[in-house]
Image (cartoon, rainbow, N blue to C red):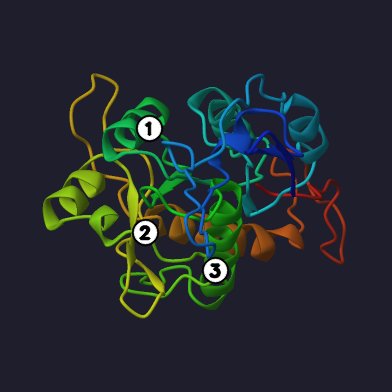
Amino acid sequence: PVTAGDAAGTTTVTAKLDGPRGNYIPVRCTSLAAGLAVAEPATGYLTGGATSDDPANALAVLAPVRYHYVVPPYEDATNLADYKAHCVDNAEPLQGRRQQWVGSSIDTLANTTTLATTLNASRGQIAWEENGDTLPSEMNAALAAYRALKDGTSVSWNYDGDVLKGVVAQNDTADYPTGAALASALNNGITPLQSQADGTVKIVRSITSRSQDAAGNPSYNVLDTSKVTVPDGLADEIQAEFAGERWRNRNIDVGDSDGAPVSENGVTK
């Protein structure tokens, strides 16, 4: 939410969020009064948000529980890196909490490319809609919710061309991505969103933000998000299948006429 106040002909809009997330709130000015000129910020967004909050406490609360999709409210590499580490650490075999995080950007293609390649995360996703009017945090939530819905239907769901509800089309058609821009985005670990004439927004292709190997060379072996959801889904099924199994200790003679095991393992991973 925001509040507005006027002083000497200047209207100041103040966001409740005092950090950099408020800098992504769009501003549009319209005047119906004859002879009255209005001017909006040069960027089309609020400015002045500075110090970011720290997600450490929130991630600490999430740590013991598995959430298939984690939705950060951030759009900067520093905070998103914390979510990347959270998902990677929790997906380790001894933890077994396989998760993915969903982020986004309304910045330029160049800046979004820097963001995606810096994170380079197989368990992360960066959607992109340049100069969009949907807050990145809301875009993250919309995409994560849609993926949760469709991946629950099929872990190999094909998102190409799907309409993403909750995200509005770009206000200016000049911001619509060209074919070359879409190709560049996909080559650099970015999930492009494409505005339509009817006001809807479609997912071009749902991919992870991993586009490079450790040496910085192009690497697309974990390209589509299904490259993560399918193995995770298989692991879930195997874990569920074996969770109720009881195994005899091969090092101890059963020595029981009814075949009951002497030693049992309660959980198999």
Other residues around mark 1 within 10 Å, as few (<14) / some (14–19) / many (≥20): many
- Image height of 8 relative to 159, above or below: above
User: Which element is circle 2 on?
Assistant: loop
- Which residue, given by chain and number where applicable, does mark 1 sit on? 120
**Left or right, residue 8 beside residue 105:** right
Picture residue at 36% right of the left edge, 48% below the top? 130
Q: Amino acid at mark 3?
A: Tyr
Precedes in sequence: disc 3 or disc 2: 3
- Which residue, given by chain and number where applicable, does mark 3 sit on? 146
Q: How many marks?
A: 3
Picture residue at 54% right of the left edge, 22% below the top? 78
Other residues around mark 3 within 10 Å, as few (<14) / some (14–19) / many (≥20): some
Residue 186 at x, y = what percent? 24, 49
The mark lying in front, picked from 1 and 3, is: 3
- Which residue, given by chain and number where applicable, does mark 2 sit on? 206
Residue 92 at least partly seen: no
Residue 151 at least partly seen: yes
Residue 235 at x, y = what percent? 55, 56
- Image height of 154 relative to 249, above or below: below
- Tell me how far mark 3 sits from mark 2, CA to CA: 11 Å
Picture residue at 67% right of the left edge, 28% below the top? 19
- Tell me how far mark 2 sits from mark 1, CA to CA: 15 Å
Residue 30 at x, y = what percent? 51, 59
Q: Amino acid at mark 1?
A: Asn
Picture residue at 18% right of the left edge, 44% below the top? 184
Precedes in sequence: disc 2 or disc 1: 1
Q: Amino acid at mark 2?
A: Ser
